[in-house]
Image: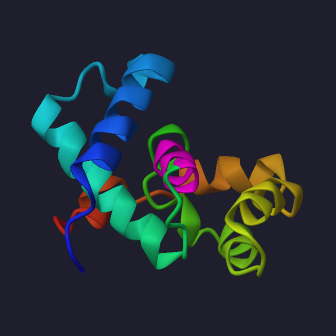
Amino acid sequence: MSEPPEELVDHIITHLGEQQPELIASIGDAEVRRRVLAGIARAHAHRFVQPESVTAFVTLMFLVAPDFDSHPAIARALRLHGSEPDRLRLLFQRTREEDWDEATASSKGWPSILGES
């Protein structure tokens, strides 16, 4: 797969820095970029390609867990059909708070996403 547009990468990094600065404060710029690139690829694998949807997906990777989409209930919700905004909405309607907590607790972390484990 080709590299995502720099505008999208920069947009997501800016979004994280403005909306969730505590999530990236202790991570160097190069590592944030590397994680964002991995997140974009993961979002694309789930058929999210619109900038808003990709940004939301990558933000969830930083907020919840980088592999949140591996949780069975979340994975099922991500496979639903519909427009990207509808699928994001259904992601929260079809899952429970406990699913998100479990996704955080069972995460293998960024090394698993970045191919380091």
Q: Could you tell me residue 84's position as x and y percent?
A: 68, 65
Q: Is residue 80 above or below residue 88?
A: below
Relative depth, front residue between 77 and 105: 77
Q: Could you tell me residue 100's position as x and y percent?
A: 69, 51
The residue located at (47%, 49%) in the rendering is 61
| Residue 47 covered by magenta stretch | no
Q: Is residue 87 left or right of residue 42?
A: right
- Picture quadrant where residue 111 is located: bottom left
Q: Is residue 87 above or below residue 11?
A: below
| Residue 56 covered by magenta stretch | yes
Relative depth, front residue between 29 and 114: 29
The residue located at (37%, 22%) in the rendering is 17
Relative depth, front residue between 85 and 78: 85
The residue located at (21%, 75%) in the rendering is 2
The residue located at (51%, 21%) in the rendering is 19
Q: Is residue 46 above or below residue 65?
A: below
Q: Is residue 101 left or right of residue 13?
A: right
> Looking at the rendering, in which quadrant would you find the N terminus?
bottom left
Q: Is residue 79 left or right of residue 42?
A: right
Q: Specify start and end residues of the magenta stretch as a single range.
A: 52-60
What kind of secondary structure does the magenta stretch mostly adopt?
helix
Q: Is residue 24 left or right of residue 78?
A: left
Q: How is the image coloured?
A: rainbow
- Picture quadrant where residue 15 is located: top left
User: How many numbered circles does the render carry?
Assistant: 0
- Picture quadrant where residue 41 is located: bottom left
> Looking at the rendering, in which quadrant would you find the C terminus?
bottom left
Q: Is residue 16 above or below residue 82?
A: above
Q: Could you tell me residue 11's position as x and y percent?
A: 37, 37
